[in-house]
Image (tube, rainbow, N blue to C red):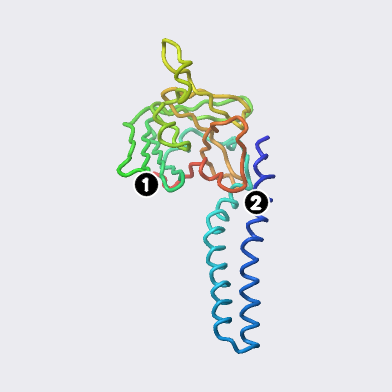
Amino acid sequence: MGWGLCCICLPLMILAVGVLVAPAALGIREMLLGLRSGKRRRVVMGAALLVGSVVLAALLTVKPAQSVRFCAQAPYLPPPTTFEDEDLVGTWRAHYDGSVDTLIFKADRTFKQVYEDRNEEDYVYETPWNEWSVDRYADGSVRIRLQGGRYYPAGIYMAERDGMHPDLPGMWGASGPPAYSFYDAFAEDTVTMVGELVINVRADRSGELLLHHMFIEIDEGFGVIGCERNIFRRVDTP
């Protein structure tokens, strides 16, 4: 089920290529006809179409191409058997549509999360040095629990609920809103994260560790393009 989005992404990519190729081909045709007929204006128009298509293609494909390099390996591997908790120490970073989410792990089992939303002026969330811990499972999978951490891939509103359900206030009980059920696509199970952030530790084919977010929907899958927004990658080691 996790690969469902791949079947959607491929036809869309083919369609996008067609939309970009058509004006480029028209531009080349106009340039050639202009050169043959000696009409300078036609040559200029054709060149403009061709250059515009190339620039647009670059803008649309450079970032997705970077994502495909890693996303093609989804759903990734469990961490290697040599993995130790200390391997997490350092700085990890994720990007969500221009926003930056940073996790800093220290060897004393404390961490700090710093989230900066560049779409919302002056919005910064920073935790104190809270505790982090590791859960290990029989199948080799590993999860990290970050006390006081927030889930920001779905936006500020969702994150500030601190793991409680953001909708349906009329159905809340006397104790307040129910816990929101996030989806772990690796374990194919739901996870609650009330007052904490829970992240999977995975590895790519080269053995490089990555930290993978839970999903907010059960039918959410590993898309070929854009899956990097669900991943923290190491940017610094102590």
Judging from the image, what secondary structure is the residue with disc 2 in?
Answer: helix
Of residues 206 and 191, the one drawn nearer to the viewer in this rendering: 191
Q: Which residue is mark 1?
A: 118
Q: Position of residue 132 (x, y in %)?
A: 42, 28
**Front: mark 2 or 1:** 2
On screen, residue 208 versus residue 112, left or right, reads right
* Residue 161, quarter of the rendered image: top left
Tag 1: residue type?
Arg
Lateral position of residue 129 relative to residue 237, left or right? left
How many numbered callouts?
Answer: 2
Spot the residue most to the top. 174
Identified by mark 2, the residue type is Leu
Residue 35, compared with residue 205, is above or below; it is below
Q: Position of residue 215 (x, y in %)?
A: 55, 33
User: Toward which corner of the image does residue 238 lie, by quadrant?
Assistant: top left
Residue placed under numbered mark 2 in the picture: 12
